[in-house]
Amino acid sequence: MDFEPSDDQRLLLESVSRMLTDTYSFAQRKTYLAAPEGYSTAMWARFAEQGLLGVPFAEEYGGYGGGAQEIMLVMQAFGRVLVLEPYLATVVLGGGAVRIAGTDAQKKAILPAICEGNLKMAFAHSERQARYDLTDVVTTAKRDGDAWVLDGSKTVVQHGDTADKLVISARTSGERYDADGITLFLVDTSAPGLARRSYATRDETRAADISLGNVRVSDADVLGEVGKGLAIIQAVIDAGIAATAAETVGAMEAMNEMTLEYSKTRVQFGAPIGTYQVVQHRMSDMFMTQEQGRSMAMLATMMMDEEDQATRAHNMAMAKVGVAQAGRYVSQSAVQMHGGIGMTEEYAVGHYFRRCMVMERLWGDPAYYLQKLADEVN
Amino acid sequence: MDFEPSDDQRLLLESVSRMLTDTYSFAQRKTYLAAPEGYSTAMWARFAEQGLLGVPFAEEYGGYGGGAQEIMLVMQAFGRVLVLEPYLATVVLGGGAVRIAGTDAQKKAILPAICEGNLKMAFAHSERQARYDLTDVVTTAKRDGDAWVLDGSKTVVQHGDTADKLVISARTSGERYDADGITLFLVDTSAPGLARRSYATRDETRAADISLGNVRVSDADVLGEVGKGLAIIQAVIDAGIAATAAETVGAMEAMNEMTLEYSKTRVQFGAPIGTYQVVQHRMSDMFMTQEQGRSMAMLATMMMDEEDQATRAHNMAMAKVGVAQAGRYVSQSAVQMHGGIGMTEEYAVGHYFRRCMVMERLWGDPAYYLQKLADEVN
Amino acid sequence: MDLRFTPEEIAFREEVRAFIRDNLPTDIRDRMKLGHSPRKEDIVRWQRILNAKGWAGLSWPKEWGGPGWTAIQKMIFLEENQVAPAPELSSFNITMIGPVLLQFGTEEQKKRFLPRAANIDDWWCQGFSEPGAGSDLASLKTAAKREGDHYIVNGQKIWTSTAHVADWCFLLVRTNPNARKRQEGISFLLVDMKTPGITVRPIISIDGSHHLNEVFFDDVKVPVDLRVYEENKGWDVAKFLLGNERTGIARLGKSRERVNASVEMARQVNNNGRPLIEDSTFRQRVAQLEIDMKALEITQYRVVSAYDKAGGSGRPDPLSSVLKVKGTELLQATTELAIDVAGPMATPIWAEELAALNEPDDLLEASSASVGAYLFLRAASIYGGTNEIQKNILTKAVLGL
Amino acid sequence: MDLRFTPEEIAFREEVRAFIRDNLPTDIRDRMKLGHSPRKEDIVRWQRILNAKGWAGLSWPKEWGGPGWTAIQKMIFLEENQVAPAPELSSFNITMIGPVLLQFGTEEQKKRFLPRAANIDDWWCQGFSEPGAGSDLASLKTAAKREGDHYIVNGQKIWTSTAHVADWCFLLVRTNPNARKRQEGISFLLVDMKTPGITVRPIISIDGSHHLNEVFFDDVKVPVDLRVYEENKGWDVAKFLLGNERTGIARLGKSRERVNASVEMARQVNNNGRPLIEDSTFRQRVAQLEIDMKALEITQYRVVSAYDKAGGSGRPDPLSSVLKVKGTELLQATTELAIDVAGPMATPIWAEELAALNEPDDLLEASSASVGAYLFLRAASIYGGTNEIQKNILTKAVLGL
């Protein structure tokens, strides 16, 4: 065991942090938010320039050749400033699906384009009736000659509105709730029959509902084996859990630093609130919670290399619950310690609060994973 | 609604409190504990003299003619000083069963003797395999001529070792877990075939395992209707829940007062610990919890007059959970605020702690009742 | 001691419930059932219906249009009104400025303002908090200088809820900057929000709503006869107002309503192939909340019953702080329950999507609204004295430390 | 960064597990599995087995009989030993007086005491706390006056764990009552418990056990060469000792063992006609504890790994306080789980009943013992600096307030 980053990792982290210090103040972020995309296309280009969009992809596809640890470092830095750009959607989820399950041809077609910043992706799996159940897929893909024809709809596809290409799950056989029979497809968002309705989510990014009416997809755009999509979906979601765990840690760090700073300057009853023992102990609790959350984010990262499926799923569930609970406690506490100002849109802390709230319920909330873990108690 | 005691109730409370102030210091209590019974027979006589043993019984049987409210007042006062005598076992449970279900002849034979301090009782229902399930009765009572023959065993019968007479449940028909077929019997502890093994419980009182081998009981000693004992058992337990709820409130009051007093005198780092804000807020939390617990004890008391069974059971379960959780929080906090001294046998707070721990799990713990309540959510 | 409701109280509850059922406009109820905050016009509409019935001036004496209820009756009314769910009475009008004028106002002030407050012909707001003051109210700086029969007010207020829609504001100002203690030298003024020199700037809350404002006073002229009570004695008025009858401070009906709404939603959402309502963890969470609400309900009746016994006056009960702390904990826990039921559907703000749909989708709408309530009520443990301040109060008042 | 165990570490864990499985006396294991604390003779017996294997001097250098493990290996050993469950190494001997002598002792002192400490030929106890001092250790008053080549010790210690069975005591005394600061003027002495003038009075804990004592010193003569380090510099030694390697401070293995035991009990107890293990609330509670234990396990490895990286020295990591707070919270939560599983059977002290039975009843015995552990470990958040003190430490060290 060794928790210190390698020299390369340190360099990566430093370059990301330096860039964000220059470009991602809360005020600068507001200007990015004002763009129609809800983020900065210039920043996206900059990420490409710095090689960030290729972090988890092999060098032969133009990537950096990193792994889960590098993603952890980047996402943690992103969490500290609430990066708005569709990194999670494109690099971790959409690109991740291609990385995990793509053919060489698919990788060649897609990954370099992602690395260069020329292709944005999103992961369209959830359906409105499904809540957190991954097998609750009723969108269908039917064989028609050489092609597949997709019909159905997907919901809350993060950054689905600005994505160029989607990874879409559809049922090619079996019934709702069947583990088998789900297949993934790579679909251009310009495909005839594909429509998007976009809306804001509570963390100020945008998501989309996708409707599919008679969308034709060729065999070459099937991702992975027909009917065996669930394992890929789970692997993609594991990557998403690890990445958002790290992002949550970054957000907790930022909230704790903000709270500490505020406690030194905010005077009530003649003294800075940071001199009151109750405030001090609450901040100690927030710090401890952050550190326990960080440990769980590390667990998620280390499990990305675990090959035993059961071990991996068990630990991923633990990490997901631990990080979500930590994020909820720290963000609720940070708002409380700030008092009125923490409740306002102008001040940063509420934005971190809402981002944590959104991340907490991506791919399942604590109650969902606790139930899974409880089922395993023996 | 009116939460003020009546003049009579105030008098009762004052006389009990006065007596306990004179007789029940922590040091005096230690001497009572040293007796072979684990309590003071002299105090028992004194309770009789003051009419306390007749509080819930009608005047025609030598009682005071009080109800659940009077029991609440007495038990709360008892809880403040951790009264050791078998009041709950005799007056609330054993005597309560007779009051609820006895024939006039049974009442005449038993209640005056209780009031005069000449008869102690205990309530022998639980069996070792049953945990908290009231219908898990495998002790049997079989018809043999004019008599009933009891075989089986009962566990953790509080004050069963010094009781003169037991209320014993046994199955007269049906199977384990059947609601019907349970019958209550009044049995002298001197009955042939009845054996007792006594042991200490964590609150320093004593309990007994009762074994029944071919114990013959006459028809006159059947309490209530044959086979219909469960409703009586539930009513007795409701009385027990209400009484121990009030006792828990008294114990919480005592612990909170002790903690407050200690916080004013115990100096650490140059100042009484009561000047530290974290200690102050913890004590505020303990106070709030006590008051919420008091409200729930009042709920239990008011439900003793509720005739709708479902409403009564629902509210009793809520009160039981609320009071148990309050007692656990306050007693754990009281030990923590006392530090090392709170961990010692010489100091009072640990004794309150353990009494709360015992009361919390009489007739079902919070998890048990929460489950019942969860089943009713609709 | 009579620990149960009297038959009269039970009958009263039935009467209130029936009146609300029969008179609350359906469109208001429907919106609120989905978890939306009532709009200004909803509040006005409902309060006028209640006022016509004689029920709006909750705790006011009968001569000023109050219903003459006992404190327990008031409690019952508030709870039924919240559970309905119906818009709550304007607290600024009914539990703040009304009682203040009744206690400290001149006959002229009462006549001029009370009937209009009851009917929300005037919408009032409260100008207390200032930047840098927060829970430490007495450190306020907004200055009022006497010039003839006017005060000239300069300064800034913050967190002024509904100032942007208000007609009048009751305001704490410093009239004597040289007073020995900070609490002295404060006066209590009534200000017409249309007076020149007042600028209202919105503060958007983290739920995206506009409730709060900054209010700037720049040489604002306020007639001296709009001062309530004596000059430099405004702190007495403020203390009365803040300590005044804490009936309803727990807002228990609102918590209950959120639990009811969550259970309703849980019937409709799917959890691993079964309705969430069947999930035992969800059910236990609801059961625990019901227990906590029941405990607080009784504590609340103990407080108001003691208040009734004391003849409706008396110093504020320190148990009020228990009501505030436990009440807001429940408001936060019950709104948290609702967003957890909404699950992944709590993430989007569905307004755009709903507008694009051909027909209403109540579940989507309720999911979205549940988050609004959750976010907005993070402030519940902050406003009116943070919960930390409430524990300081308990430390002093109950523990004597 | 390598966030997983190395193959060597995994092999080491297997080796430890196998050694314990093959060498831990069955009677000790059986008693502990039922939740009993180990007896003194159990602790001695097991530590001598470990010492023969070269494993007792956990963090000591090889030349003094230490195994030469990395901090992570130590962690692994401690956890496996606790989970087994096996008696823990005597902390007084192994993690307290041993490292103190290694750091501050004379060659003579090391030779005399270290081998006997490793083998528990001497049983050590710690004379630090005093009445009135508590977590505020530096306010100690026990005095040692120099007379020739002896100190004459007078005063009282309290909470002296195992003093009644100890052979030796390491003791903080005040040698200069006039020092400018309280921390100055303190010295660190080694005292033979058989020295005349020492009286040990038992303190019975709320679980009924006798672990703690008061120790009175009445003109007790201690040779000057049994002082460790310089006169009046004893606070440096104490600080080293208290801040020294907090490996194992979380006692995570003990928490895990309590969860394992609870799950085992839950298979055997009946809950409404089904084994409690099938109850979903119970299972969720176990799952939540496993999550919390896992988080602390990783935090712990982060701390010890940093310690290893720093070459096994370095100032105590402030994260140690996190280990203490979260570790004791878990000890308390897991022992609480066990008593809740025991349910109504947790109420009696079954000793008398068990003695009367013809054959053992493990479930009864485990129920009873579970309460002993629960009660005794209420002290876990008190000893070694209360959890409130730990948060004060974090406030200073991490937050810089």
Image (tube, coloured by chain):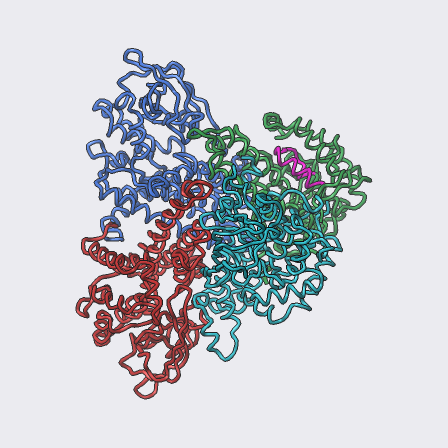
Chain colours: A red, B green, C cyan, D blue
- Relative horizontal placement of residue D364, taking residue A117 as reference (left or right): right
What's the magenta bit mostly, secondary-structure-wise?
A: helix
Q: Nearer the viewer, residue C151 or C206?
A: C151
Residue at point 24%, 30% (across, down):
D103
Can residue D358 be seen at all in this image of the molecule? no
Relative height, residue D37 to residue C200 (above, below): above
Looking at this view, name the residue that lies furthest to the bottom.
A145
Is C380 contained in the magenta span? no
- Farthest-out residue, top: D148
Question: Looking at the image, can residue D131 be seen?
Answer: yes
Q: Is residue C145 left or right of residue A262?
A: right
Q: Is residue A212 above or below residue C20?
A: below
Horizontal and vertical percent position of residue B348: 55, 31
Q: Position of residue A286 (x, y in %)?
A: 39, 48
- The picture places residue C273, in percent across and down from the top left corner, at 48, 69
At which x and y percent is residue D8? Answer: 22, 49
Q: Is residue B77 magenta?
A: yes
Q: Measured along the vertical axis of the image, is residue C134 above or below residue D358?
A: below
Please report the bounds of the magenta region as a residue range.
Answer: B70-90
